[in-house]
Image (tube, coloured by chain):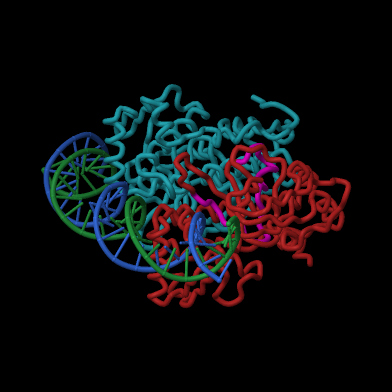
Chain colours: A red, B cyan, C green, D blue
Amino acid sequence: MRQHGGGVGAGLRTFDGSVVRPIPTRFARRIAALRALSPEERHALGTAFAPATVVPPGTDLMVEGDSLTYGYIVEEGWACGYRLLNDGRRQILNFVLPGDCIGVSAAVIRTADHSACTLTPCRVIPFSAPRLAELQRGCPQLGEAFAWSTRLELAMLQERLVNLGRRTARERVAHLILELLHRLRLVGLADGTAFELPLTQGALGDALGLSIVHVNRTLRRLNNEGVIRYRPGVVAAIDLPALARIAEFDEDYLHQAGSPPPTNGAATG
Amino acid sequence: MRQHGGGVGAGLRTFDGSVVRPIPTRFARRIAALRALSPEERHALGTAFAPATVVPPGTDLMVEGDSLTYGYIVEEGWACGYRLLNDGRRQILNFVLPGDCIGVSAAVIRTADHSACTLTPCRVIPFSAPRLAELQRGCPQLGEAFAWSTRLELAMLQERLVNLGRRTARERVAHLILELLHRLRLVGLADGTAFELPLTQGALGDALGLSIVHVNRTLRRLNNEGVIRYRPGVVAAIDLPALARIAEFDEDYLHQAGSPPPTNGAATG
DNA sequence: CGGCAGCTTGATTCAGATCAACGAGAGTGG
DNA sequence: CCACTCTCGTTGATCTGAATCAAGCTGCCG
């Protein structure tokens, strides 16, 4: 881990494979929502995790090119995946919200194809990538759950590609706000239409392919139009239908494109 | 299937599950390169395919929102995945080259989250999505191969996101040319630095998030600079190092980020 | 032959970048 | 306690990469 800003480096403990830990809650809920796991499977899954740690903002959890031996579940806080160009231009690829993972791909590929860093203080749970890969091999349910979640990631990336390729700044901003609102709702971090947005305008710009200045003006404009209420740190989607219209937002892609695939059971607590 | 341009609609035959067909060659080679399959697995895989068909350019093989019951392997010709906005703006998400698939996600999700259409006449091999999903369940090797190829797709999408978000027109065009060159090489459709590019400038624009006019001018500029030689239908990467420098192109992401994951064997013919 | 799709080029416009400056708050050190 | 610095947000002025508008060209197909 490497830190960008100031802050104390919180050294992560390594795994102790012999210890079985309970499956992290948010993450468990997500997996369970996809596939019912047997008690043995849950137990096996538990062996892949290390104890949770808190890391300060601006910490790189994964660096492009590094070999991938472990990943993280983010239980609390925001992080993001990004790529850097030689001259410093940055593209944020995805925002990692509580319950999301960093480095799941480690189960499949050997080297990180992008970096990831925390944007706020984060409580993360490191997991062993080889262990997880092994588990997937032994437990088809788990493998399917991961295939599913990878597919979801793909759907989000596609949506973002459309955003950057063919939408105006105003549309992009509206779309991002709706994406975040819906994703936060799914994990119970937004109830109404307002939510905490712990992102600098610089980060927003790097996600949306816009300059800081233009992000600022676009937010202001949406503010003035009365469709959102933005203050640094907080947004509210005042006029949800208007926002959805502007962004042509269809939340289906976040709900995993229809019903879950055929399986044997429902979610477990 | 729905066609955009003129042309004769080639009705696809439906599957006859009882017939075992040989695994399509390009596709087989790709899968084999990832995982060694046993004879039984190859046999099982063969039952998922329908006979090859040729479809004219401009044919929709998949439409956003449609339920996904089958997908296609493209054995010959170019196709693309795309999304359309209400006002007609189009974003091409990916180019589908010989050996690539359309609708693999059908094994995981129920409804297409994007459309796909042929750009040239294509020889395609329809496959049954449920059948393939079933096979994956029974054959972990196959499941892993697909997980792997999904990951590859994800890596390409990420690269494109960086392209659209943070690169200039010139850089984008250079990058696309290199991506296509390398991908075509991998399937033996480009040897030196030149290759057939059966894409209209409109299609290029829709992939790169640029207008037709600007694509034209950018190609011309790269031409004049002597880094490429472009004629409608054909490109040559004259100055490969210069192109790579312009695009900050790193071919690793296409070679599947390092060595293949641990497995039991090498490729089979 | 006409019509169409794609390519090309010039002229003009505009969305968004860049440059520049300032203010507010947070942390740091004396 | 204050001065200093840093990051972030905000706003104005200016510039520019790329879009749009417009027109003519080519080759192909019916």
Where residue A55 sits, quadrant-wise, is bottom right
- Residue found 39% across the figure and 39% down from its top: B171
Q: Can you say whether A142 is above or below B179 in the image?
A: below
- Residue toward you, B97 or A203: A203
- Residue toward you, B70 or C21: C21
Q: Can you say whether B132 is above or below B249 in the image?
A: below
Q: Is residue B135 visible to us here?
A: yes
Residue A63 in the figure: left or right of residue A49: left
The location of residue B49, given as percent across then percent down, is 60, 41
Identify the residue at the far right of this view: A18
Part of the protein shown in magenta = A91-112
- Residue found 53% across the figure and 71% down from its top: A234
The location of residue A212, given as percent across then percent down, is 42, 58
Where residue A213 sits, quadrant-wise, is bottom left
Q: How many marks?
A: 0
Residue A33 in the figure: left or right of residue B203: right
The location of residue B110, given as percent across then percent down, is 60, 57
Where residue A122 sits, quadrant-wise, is bottom right
Location of the C terminus of chain B (image quadrant) = top right
- Residue found 60% across the figure and 63% down from its top: A255
Residue B218 in the figure: left or right of residue A232: left
Q: Is residue A96 magenta?
A: yes
Q: Can you say whether B230 is above or below D22 in the image?
A: above
The location of residue A246, given as percent across then percent down, is 41, 68
Q: Is residue B143 visible to us here?
A: no
Q: Is residue B239 magenta?
A: no
